Image (spheres, grey):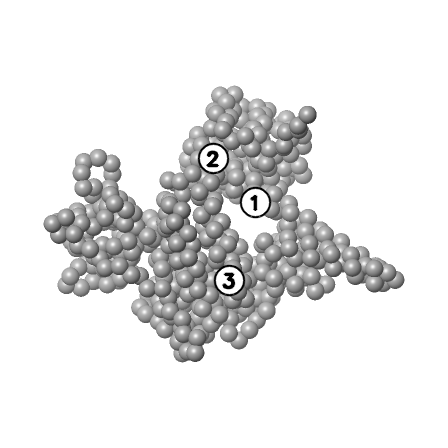
Amino acid sequence: MAHSRRPSIVVLLIDDQLIIAERIRELLGTENYIAVHHCQDPVAAFDTAKSVKPTVILQDLMMPGVDGLEVLQQLKQSPSTRDVPVVVLSTKEDPAIKAKAFRVGANDYLIKLPSAVELIARLRYHSEAFRNENMRQMAMQALTESREELRRSHEQIARQAVVLETRNRFITKTFGRYLSDEVVNQLLESPEGLKLGGENRVVTIMLADLRGFTAISDKLPATDVVLMLNGFLAAMSRVITAHQGTIDKFMGDAVMAIFGAPVSREDDALRAARCAIEMHHALQTVNDTHRSSGLPMLDMGVALHTGEVVVGNIGSDLRTEYSVIGSNVNLAARIESLSVGGQVLISDATRQAIGLSAITGRELRFQAKGFQKEMCAWELLGLDGSQRLLLPTRSGIQQRFDPPRPLQLWLAKNKHASGPPTTGFMISANEYGARIRTEIALPQFTEVRLVIEPDEPGPAGTEIWARVMQSDADGVLLQFAGISELTDRRHAPRSPGG
């Protein structure tokens, strides 16, 4: 008789309402690899967790007779559940309650009841992270055991060397999914490699983030979202490791890497700059694949900053990661938030570290939290020298709208629009940017939110986030934060008389 496989995702739902459990099962009913175990009693949930071994926990905050936050805290303290991702499932949208939940230990927060697509995507994400972390801890344990055996086995060194080599190959293969080969080799070669601690070091930090991916993912099946994201991260990882960068972490649709640790070289900033440009070229190849598969195009902004950070094995005895921390990491993130699709922004410190080979464009001045003086960043257009390399150009002539398209415009900051809208007209556009006319003056690099009114009565108009590149007598030139939906047939610019 054939034996059924254990589901790859095991969900423990802690909620006093049977109707919620039934609804959750309905949402997940078509996914036969997801098993749902419902527990109405929070006290009994701990014994249930020992039995079913969940890969993710869905927990309600509002249950009679108990404090949901206390239950969450106990889940994060209990040996059987402390490492299992907990997704809070609540009707409360109060930001203060969300903040408390995350402070206590929640990994995610969903408002009842989410869509099936969102719920499935989040369950997959957290379950995969849970399984990967277990594999990582197993590999770390295997590495520690191999070192200890080698230390205590001098009399059998020849025979143990073969065993150690076999285990080290396993560890290298497993850790290679998370860290660069340099970090893995340092862990393998240094007796101190697994100890917590760090050192001050000057590195170049890279942050690369997809533009508009959240909007894209909301419109696609979860399988396509994961396929696109994995393809993007794999392509970027290959470029980073080829330029001797260390992948610090993946953050949703973003990747962070460092150049200068664990091994420091004189050309760290230059390699990081070359890597950033090559990543944009690699993204073109990814988009070629998407185009042939009928998937949306991706767009990416990249930022580089050079400064002193604390670098090392950071964490606890239960979980450790090789990473960097410090105010310069925050500054790199601030610069990245100012970038738009197809762009590489570098700090002034990185520009000086690269030297004369840096081909730069416009300068951007801004204020950064924690830094008193005004900061500046530069557009990196390419690298000069014997191995000249240029950023891919944004081809495509802007086609004019006849008549101009009406729009509404809001001033924005970090993707948050504020104040009343002002009206204007879009004169011309392509998939990367547009020229508009509006009633108010827009300083260079101002972030704006646009809503283009539809051609015909019906659904709401197209929403676009953009940044002001320049203003002149012909209007305001905008660069879109990501590849715009204006490129599809419904919103394509109309040629005169068309």
Q: Looking at the rendered structure, which numbered label has been put on residue 190?
A: none
Q: Up-down: is 411 above or below 376? A: above
User: Could you tell me how far apart the alpha carbons at marks 1 and 2 are, in whole angstroms?
Assistant: 15 Å
Callout 2 secondary element = helix
Q: Position of residue 131 (x, y in %)?
A: 61, 43
Q: Residue at x 51, y 74 (%)?
A: 267
Specify whether 219 is left or right of 23: left
- From the viewer's side, name the closer residue of 478 and 105: 478
CA–CA distance in space, label 2 to label 3: 32 Å
449 lies left or right of 155: left
Residue 76 percent coordinates (x, y): 61, 39
Callout 1 amino acid: Ala
What residue does disc 2 label?
119
- Identify which residue is drawn at 39% across, 49% down: 292
Looking at the image, the residue that sits furthest to the top is 18
Q: How packed is label 3: few (under 14 Cα within 10 Å), some, or many (20 or more)?
A: many
User: Which mark is in front, 2 or 3?
Assistant: 3
Q: Is residue 11 above or below residue 454?
A: above
For the point 42% across and 32% down, the residue is: 115
Residue pointed to by mark 1: 129
Q: Amino acid at mark 3?
A: Ile
Between 51 and 293, the one lying in front of the other is 293
Q: What residue is drawn where x is 44% and y is 75%?
A: 387
- Percent across and percent down for residue 381 are 36, 68
Q: Which comes sooner in the sequence, label 1 or label 2? A: 2
Viewer-nearest of labels 3 and 1?
A: 3
Q: Are marks 3 and 1 in contact (CB under 8 Å)?
A: no
Tag 3 residue: 240
